[in-house]
Amino acid sequence: MTTRDEAMEAVSTLLSYLEKDYKREGLLSTPKRVVDSWDEIFSGYNENSGEILDATFNGEGYDGIVLLRDIEFHSTCEHHLQPFNGRAHVAYIPVDRIVGISKLSRIVDLHAKRLQNQERITKGIADDLESHLSPLGAAVIIEASHGCMRCRGVKKQNAVMTTSAMRGVFFDKQEARQELMQLIQSKPL
């Protein structure tokens, strides 16, 4: 594994590629600042979905859809190291156990705070819900704008990519999917 000092040296090398005077005052602390920011931006590598989702509560017979929508997230594209951001809608139908609402946003962050692609985030969240909660159904829908589409290549400023993963009754039953979509599209508070 690369050390922190080696990572800062690598950033210095990249700066020297971009900037002739890469040792000027404004850039002297940049390698440290970049590595510090990466520790935060990529903190998902240091988290475990089981530690987040295994703290459940008695569902007290609740068998409807549990949906947390419009969870904002920020991630980094593994192909160009460009940011992408958007919102996730995470739903499940409990059998016996429910999970605290903050856990749903934390599981989104766990997956987003890694080098990623949107499809993997979507699938990973759904996999974790299934694995740790064993629900009747799990659903994840993510909408995001990608920096690699906005500032380079095709330069499409308003393009939004949508991905979904439907499991259990959300995959098998059209009525469950329709109810979920109505809840997602309902007016915000």
Image (cartoon, rainbow, N blue to C red):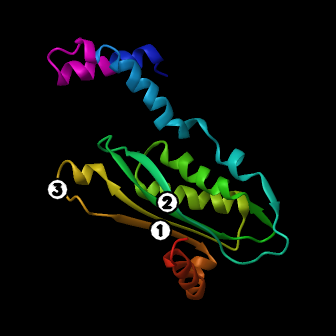
Q: Position of residue 188 (x, y in %)?
A: 52, 72
The residue to which callout 2 is attached is: 122
Q: Amino acid at mark 2?
A: Thr
Quick check: 31 above or below 47?
above
Pick whichever of labels 2 and 1 is earlier in the sequence: 2
- Is 23 contained in the magenta span? yes
Q: Do labels 2 and 1 touch, CB within 8 Å?
A: yes
Dot 1 falls on a residue whose secondary structure is: strand
Q: Position of residue 90 (x, y in %)?
A: 57, 64
- Is 125 contained in the magenta span? no
Name the disc covering residue 61, or none: none
Residue bounds of the magenta highlight? 11-26
Q: Amino acid at mark 1?
A: Ser
Relative placement, left or right, of 184 versus 155 is right
Q: Name which residue lies at 49% across and 60% down.
A: 122
Residue 144 vs residue 185, the one in the foreground = 185
Residue 135 vs residue 19, the one in the foreground = 19
Dot 2 falls on a residue whose secondary structure is: helix
Pick whichever of labels 1 and 3 is earlier in the sequence: 3
Pick whichever of labels 3 and 2 is earlier in the sequence: 2
Work out how far the residue at label 3 is from the one at label 2, CA to CA, in angstroms: 24 Å
The residue to which callout 1 is attached is: 164
Rate crowding at label 3 as few (under 14), some (14 to 19) or many (20 or more) other CA atoms within 10 Å. Answer: few
